[in-house]
Image (cartoon, grey):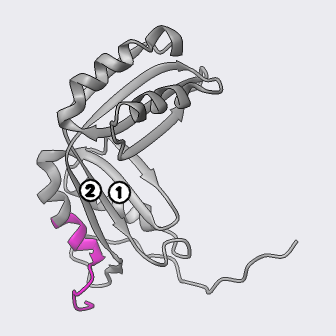
Amino acid sequence: MLREKKQYTPPLPERSLGDENKIPIGGVLQGLGLAAIRISGIPDRPGVASRIFRALGKEGINVELISHAVDHEDFSHLTFCIGKERVEETLTLLEGYQKQVGFRHMRALRKVALISVFGPHFRERHGIAGAFFYSLAEAGINILAISTSVSTCTCLISEEDMEKALGALKKVFQFPGDEPG
């Protein structure tokens, strides 16, 4: 089996707030004006996510983040973000799918926001997610959901914590245009 050869990047050291060795990133994205919908107790079987997200798409409801987990009893749990102006419409729509899909609970989290760090070398650098979560934890910010890709790490947080989150990230990450420490 051939493996792609990657350039070695040393591990990220444990960081404390104010550390001068900040992690360079490509930038930070903010998603405001959002609400999150949490659906829990979904039987884990094929087609469930399709039914939910196709129904939203047919109504023109844009979904900005999807987080999915399966618990130890094989029930799925979904959290996804929509524009906060579409909350009531979304809840009403999905109530009509409750028996068909078989979920147990659904609720809306209003006044939430997305904050993401992204960078061109996240695939090769381990510890990015840990540093991201650490910076939010040190600022006392609760993470409501997490979504990642090869180049981006996103957290769902309370909208009221956005400014505090940006300040916390600046203590750990080197933003574009910042001088290295």
Q: Which mark is residue 133?
A: 1
Is the residue 49 above or below the residue 113 in the image?
A: above
Q: Quadrant of residue 74?
A: top right
Pointer 2: what residue? Answer: 136
Write the residue at 37% across / 55% down: 154
The quadrant of the rendering that contains the N terminus is bottom right
Q: Amino acid at mark 2?
A: Leu
- Contact check, label 1 and label 2, Cβ < 8 Å: yes
SS under mark 1: helix
Write the residue at 41% across / 60% down: 153
Looking at the picture, how far across and down is residue 84, in whole percent? 19, 36
**Horizontal side, residue 162 vs residue 10: left or right:** left
Span highlighted in magenta in the image: 167-181
Q: Residues within 10 Å of mark 1 (few under 14, many from 20)?
A: some
Q: Quadrant of residue 20?
A: bottom left
Write the residue at 36% across / 78% down: 23
Residue furthest to the right: 1
Question: For this rendering, which residue is in front, 4 or 35?
Answer: 35
Write the residue at 31% across / 80% down: 22
Looking at the picture, how far across and down is residue 97, in whole percent? 44, 15
Is the residue 181 above or below the residue 99 in the image?
A: below
Looking at the picture, how far across and down is residue 109, in whole percent? 24, 31
Is there any visible trace of residue 59 in the rendered image?
yes
**Horizontal side, residue 83 vs residue 66: left or right:** left
Separation of disc 1 and disc 2 at Cα? 5 Å
Q: Amino acid at mark 1?
A: Phe
Is there any visible trace of residue 110 in the rendered image?
no
Residue furthest to the top: 99
SS under mark 2: helix
**Horizontal side, residue 108 vs residue 68: left or right:** left
Question: For this rendering, which residue is in front, 145 or 14?
Answer: 145
